[in-house]
Image (cartoon, rainbow, N blue to C red):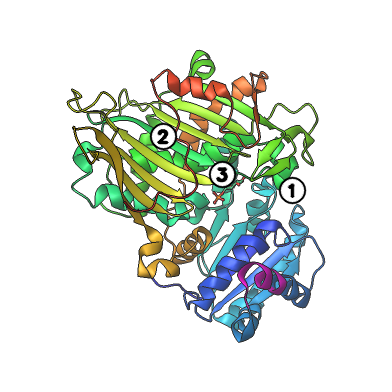
Amino acid sequence: MNIENSCIVIFGASGDLTFRKLIPALYNLFRVGRLGQHFSVLGVARSELTDDSFRTKMRDALIKFEKAEGQELEDFCTHLYYQAVNTSEALDYAKLLPRLDELHDKYGSCGNTLYYLSTPPSLYGVIPECLAAHGLTTEEYGWKRIIVEKPFGYDIKTAKELDEKIHHYFEEHQIYRIDHYLGKETVQNLLVLRFSNGLFEPLWNRNFIDYVEITGAEAIGVEERGGYYDGSGAMRDMFQNHLLQVLAMVAMEPPAIINADSMRDEVAKVLHCLHPLTAEDVKNNVVLGQYVAGEVDDQMVVGYLAEKGVPADSNTETYMAIKCEIDNWRWAGVPFYVRTGKRLPTRVTEVVIHFKTTPHPVFSQNAPENKLIIRVQPDEGISMRFGLKKPGAGFEAKEVSMDFRYSDLSSASSLLTAYERLLLDALKGDATLFARTDAVHACWKFVQPILDYKAGRGRVYEYEAGTWGPTEADKLIAKHGKVWRKPSGVMKKKV
Ligand code: BG6
């Protein structure tokens, strides 16, 4: 699919996401020739900036974050424009009309417009309405698409309300709910690994898989985002979206063909099969935690309650572990243990498929388990662990691994980052890697009982920064006779 000439309008252009992720992603796409020359980027926010001062800000960010330089950088910056708008004031959107006309004329983009909502979530419902009031959502003159950043809603009720509002002005095929985890090469690779290899498919079910572990660990704390994070917590920030999407990639049925509809049908189907949690299940199968001061990477760090923007009596979880089950033929009885947290010992996202052991241990009581480790980040790759004979007398088995690293591929350096990939897809009109409304609702529906538990000030356990979370999480997986893997952040070297 080719990209048509278009204008990308970024609402929230003075925010962090714009200069850390969006502008760098667009710059890199431009640099490698994926954007062509016939595009413009219109930054929109309240701050009174001129085109020139916006360009200077973005140029500085690109030099800082992307080490950009030279003519390429200057050329890219000529595509950047800015318009100050009070985004909560419908009348003020009139200022966009002449600006958009001018840009569409200049770049021959015939009204094709991609709106990117990178504002506080309270404006996600307001902006579409204000755009519509000025005729900026109709597709009579060029296509109109809207990317909505997470969080899409705050719970099941607000997610539905937001959907309803946006659907007043945009059709579902125009709405791109972004989850940057779906833009990660290794998350997509889960699908290719599963559905292009005859080897795995027969084993990928309850008959051969004992349990699945999904970890999204971060060593960083809440940084400068204490205010946002405290209203969100690990469940809304990571679990409800990123990790449930990863779980869906692991557990979904193969789509008949790869296109936006059939892929997203399968994702929605499996998310709808998540076993609903009762209040009792939440107590037994969910562990919430909050970090206290400790040591990460040999540095003492403060506890969550001492972070900037966090109320001193906050009960917000910075860690969560959960046992989920999927009620369908493929997965009945296979637990999915999922955990995520800030201020854990390292940054690592991985999926571990733990296969069942042999029915009878012939060689030793502690025969190695067969595991398939899919490393999403960092050091992206796949490691298959299995038992082989320990050299020497006897028949003792030892765990060995066969490893594949993405970095070994000669083409790995040209991989697109998540935002690059997703922006490009949205410009092409390909929604395959964006969350559809039914999937988002299924995720909220599943987490709602946990939100209710939290709202009732359910128990949040302390854990020391730099550890793998509260000991209660160990007890959760111990019920299955297992321990959590403690990934180091780097995959073992080849044997
Ligand atoms: C964001 C969360 O969506 O994802 C952050 O808001 C989190 O809190 C980040 O740090 C993790 O993304 P990644 O790509 O670094 O794993």
| Mark found first going from the N terminus, 2 or 1 | 2
Cα separation between marks 2 and 3? 17 Å
Front-most of 288 and 463?
Answer: 463
Horizontal and vertical percent position of residue 128: 63, 53
Judged by its main secondary structure, the magenta piece is helix
Horizontal and vertical percent position of residue 409: 35, 65
Is 206 magenta? The answer is no
Give me the residue at 71% from left, 47% from top.
Answer: 223
Q: Residue furthest front?
A: 393
Instruction: Please tell me the numbered disc located at residue 213.
Output: 2
- The amino acid pointed to by label 2 is Glu
Mark 3 lies on residue? 346
Look at the image and give the residue range highlighted in magenta: 59-68
Q: Secondary structure beneath disc 1?
A: helix
Q: Residue furthest top?
A: 280
Q: Closer to the camera: disc 2 or disc 3? A: 3
Mark 1 lies on residue? 224
Horizontal and vertical percent position of residue 268: 39, 39
- Which class describes the residues within 10 Å of circle 2: few (<14), some (14-19), or many (20+)? many
Instruction: Please tell me the numbered disc located at residue 371.
Output: none
Does residue 475 appear anywhere in the picture?
A: yes
- Which class describes the residues within 10 Å of circle 3: few (<14), some (14-19), or many (20+)? many
- Which class describes the residues within 10 Å of circle 1: few (<14), some (14-19), or many (20+)? few
Q: Is residue 245 left or right of residue 204?
A: right
Q: Disc 1 beta carbon < 8 A from ligand 1?
A: no
Q: Closer to the camera: disc 2 or disc 1? A: 2
Q: How many marks?
A: 3
